[in-house]
Amino acid sequence: MLIRIPAASSSREDEVTPEAIYLSRRTFMAGAGAAAVLSSLPVNAAGSTSAYADVEPAAAPDWFTGKLQDARWQAMTAAGEAVTPFKDATHYNNFYEFGTNKGDPARYADKLKVEPWQVKIDGEVGKPGTYSIEDLVKPHQLEERIYRLRCVEGWSMVIPWLGFPLAELLRLVEPTGNAKFVRFETRLAPEEMAGVRSGFSLIDWPYMEGLRMDEAMHPLTFIAVGMYGRVLPNQNGAPLRLVVPWKYGFKSIKSIVRISLVADQPKTTWETIAPDEYGFYSNVNPEVDHPRWSQAHERRLPSGLFSPNVIPTRMFNGYDEVAPLYSGLDLRKFY
Ligand SMILES: Nc1nc2c(c(=O)[nH]1)N[C@H]1C(S)=C(S)[C@@H](COP(=O)(O)O)O[C@H]1N2
Ligand SMILES: [Mo]
């Protein structure tokens, strides 16, 4: 992969992060409308690169590096927003299997055994089976998606993921007409997971999540296997995790080992723990507050005491195109 870091002058001042992370084709694409960017990206455009200055190099398995050559890079963030520094995105995490402090995943997730990795796909599908990560990734071109991630706790980031749409994966396993929801499950291995061993949490492991079928098939719904032009770090959910950018972060389940297509709405981890606070839908919504705090604003990382960087939260986290999925649904009731 060609790494090219453009001069600071090629970015607008308000887009510049302290760590000086730029997307190399930003200038080239300047002026393109936000919506146009994703759809107009040339496939395998010669010379397209992605450059992230503070990324730690990492050894990656062949199933990943082999795909990186042909990856399709996103030119710029949708609203020209600054990408969150890699350091923040990998050291301020929620991955309760490794502890409840934001620094725990970075400290302990190296214990997660990500090789070999298999995903069981079962339920209402024509092609159930246990698939290796190699087989799951092989049919897809990797593409970069720069998405906002809004945690229900009130902080947010902008992360450049690498992966492919969940819909592509689901189509290959041929959902039956009875498949109305998709249920996801994270690996459970107490010997690797300090947070699970501690017995300190309320969570009934494994971590579980779910989507309605039309949400799962939406083109924004993504399976990430990498970020910042490199393989996914363990603390971010290696080797594959879900990314649903218009929903609160806890829907984006990490380190998936099972995907089940089911007829009934599945039980999900946070809804099970506190149904009054966390719903099945969990769409980002500045008008529906968490019972204990407002959701009207968010702290965009990096954020500090002297520059808290608080910005208004947007409906569906700014991904308005998903609104038709919820027409006729009372979003106060189905939060
Ligand atoms: N298995 C699992 N997946 C998880 C979590 C978790 O604790 N366990 N936390 C969720 C929450 S609350 C958020 S905000 C995001 C954070 O993703 P990031 O650490 O990559 O930013 O992961 C989500 N996925
Ligand atoms: Mo979260």
Image (cartoon, rainbow, N blue to C red):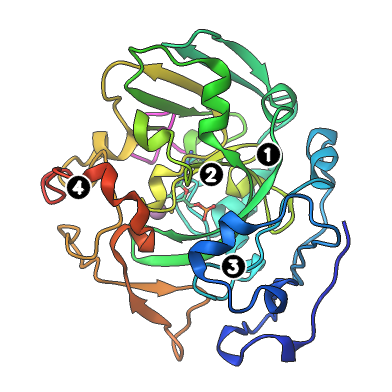
Pair 3/2: label in front: 3
Report which residue position mark 4 lands on: 335
Three-letter amino acid code at the position of disc 2: Phe
Mark 3–mark 4 CB contact (< 8 Å): no
Give how far apart the Cα atoms at labels 4 and 1 are: 35 Å
Mark 4–mark 1 CB contact (< 8 Å): no
Outermost residue toward the right in this view: 2
**Crowding at label 2, few (<14), some or many (≥20) Cα neighbours within 10 Å?**
many
Three-letter amino acid code at the position of disc 4: Tyr
Question: Residue 146 location, x and y as percent?
Answer: 57, 60
Three-letter amino acid code at the position of disc 1: Lys
Three-letter amino acid code at the position of disc 3: Asp
Q: Residues in magenta?
A: 198-208
Give how far apart the Cα atoms at labels 3 and 4 are: 28 Å
- Mark nearer the N terminus (3 vs 4): 3
Mark 2–mark 1 CB contact (< 8 Å): yes
Give how far apart the Cα atoms at labels 3 and 2 are: 17 Å
Give how far apart the Cα atoms at labels 2 and 1 are: 9 Å
Q: In this view, does 329 lie to the left or right of 14?
A: left
11 and 30: which is toward the camera:
30
- Mark nearer the N terminus (3 vs 2): 3
Report which residue position mark 3 lands on: 88
Report which residue position mark 2 lands on: 98
201 and 272: which is toward the camera:
272
41 and 161: which is toward the camera:
41
Q: Quadrant of residue 82?
A: bottom right
Question: Residue 293 location, x and y as percent?
Answer: 20, 65
Kindly report the secondary structure that dominates the magenta region of the rendered protein: loop
Give how far apart the Cα atoms at labels 2 and 4 are: 28 Å
